[in-house]
Image (cartoon, rainbow, N blue to C red):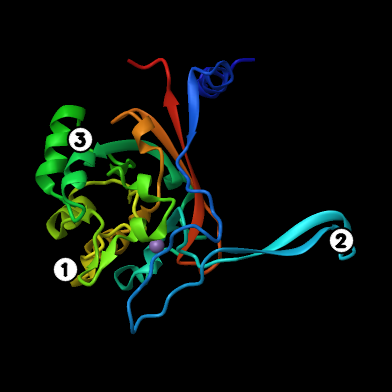
Amino acid sequence: MTNPESTAVLPAFLDALAAGRLEVIDLTTPLSSATPALRLPEPFANLIDFSLEEVSAYNEPGPFWRHNNIHTGEHVGTHLDAPVHWVTGRDGDDVSQIPVRRLIGPAAVLDLTDRVAADPDYLLTVADVETWEREHGPLAAGMWLLLRTGWESRGEAEAEFLNADDTGSHTPGVAVECARWLATEREITGLGVETVGVDAGLAGGFDPAFPVHHYFLGNDKYGITSLRNLGRLPAVGAMLVVSPLPVVGGTGSPSRVLAVIDRTAA
Ligand code: MN
């Protein structure tokens, strides 16, 4: 009866989940009208915020049920950027076309919390990634690189989260050369961040502007934003599951992002 080709990993996986040896961690920011969202300066147009509109609530419009309309921009809260979001990826996949195989993969967590505490405009460098790789091994094909910055602690208040003043929004990100290098020299699937967007707050003034968007989405890679709980993940060894809605023609989608960690790992 047993298929000799079977690796039987799924029964072992499910047993470990049931026994609590594997733990599922939610990396998603709860989605409400209070969820911080990007605020583009004039003359650019902004998306609408998320909102819930009651249609019925066990009352005359629907006596036995409650249901709502949702209104939202695509790029609100924890969300995925699809290649077609950026002009460099305009011929690439929309969010419904992303191969689902790429939405599950290993997570690599790079911790910049100390540097960002000292400098909210800190930019990840190639040297930072190479230092990480010497300790944890190379960023492998299919990995998601997750930048832990501690920024999630500001997530309950939009002003703190966007951290803007007269000179722009001061939030951490990735240096131009590092964005290019990660997108072209590593076969990672994408970049995940705690901030409102995958680029630094001041990245509109970089060359090219918004380099993570420019290089990642132009190289068939993805972005995820507004992640939480990255501090609960090991540097390597977690499995990431990203679940954007398959909106036909969509450039991104609010997404539930889950991590599975091995609680028995050293
Ligand atoms: Mn986006």
Circle 3 Cα neighbour tier, 10 Å, few/some/many (<14 / 14–19 / ≥20): some
* Residue 124 numbered tag: none
User: Residue 112 vs residue 38: left or right?
Assistant: left
**Compared with residue 259, is residue 226 higher up or lower down, i.e. above or below?**
below
Circle 1 Cα neighbour tier, 10 Å, few/some/many (<14 / 14–19 / ≥20): few
Query: Of label 2 and label 3, which has the lower sequence position?
Result: 2
Q: Are marks 1 and 3 in contact (CB under 8 Å)?
A: no
Residue at 21% across, 65% down? 202
- Which type of secondary structure does the marked residue at label 1 adopt? loop
Q: Quadrant of residue 52?
A: bottom right
Residue nearest the viewer, comparing 20 with 92: 20
Residue 71 percent across, percent down from the top left: 60, 67
Residue at 16% across, 41% down? 129
Check disc 2 and report the residue beneath it: 62
Residue nearest the viewer, comparing 239 with 158: 158
Residue 62 percent across, percent down from the top left: 87, 61
Query: Of label 1 and label 3, which has the lower sequence position?
Result: 3
Q: Amino acid at mark 1?
A: Phe
Query: Of label 2 and label 1, which has the lower sequence position?
Result: 2
- Under 8 Å from ligand 1: the CB of mark 1? no
**Compared with residue 89, is residue 132 higher up or lower down, i.e. above or below?**
above
**Compared with residue 78, is residue 91 higher up or lower down, i.e. above or below?**
below
Check disc 3 and report the residue beneath it: 138
* Residue 206 numbered tag: 1
Q: Amino acid at mark 2?
A: Gly
Residue at 12% across, 39% down? 130
Q: Quadrant of residue 161?
A: bottom left
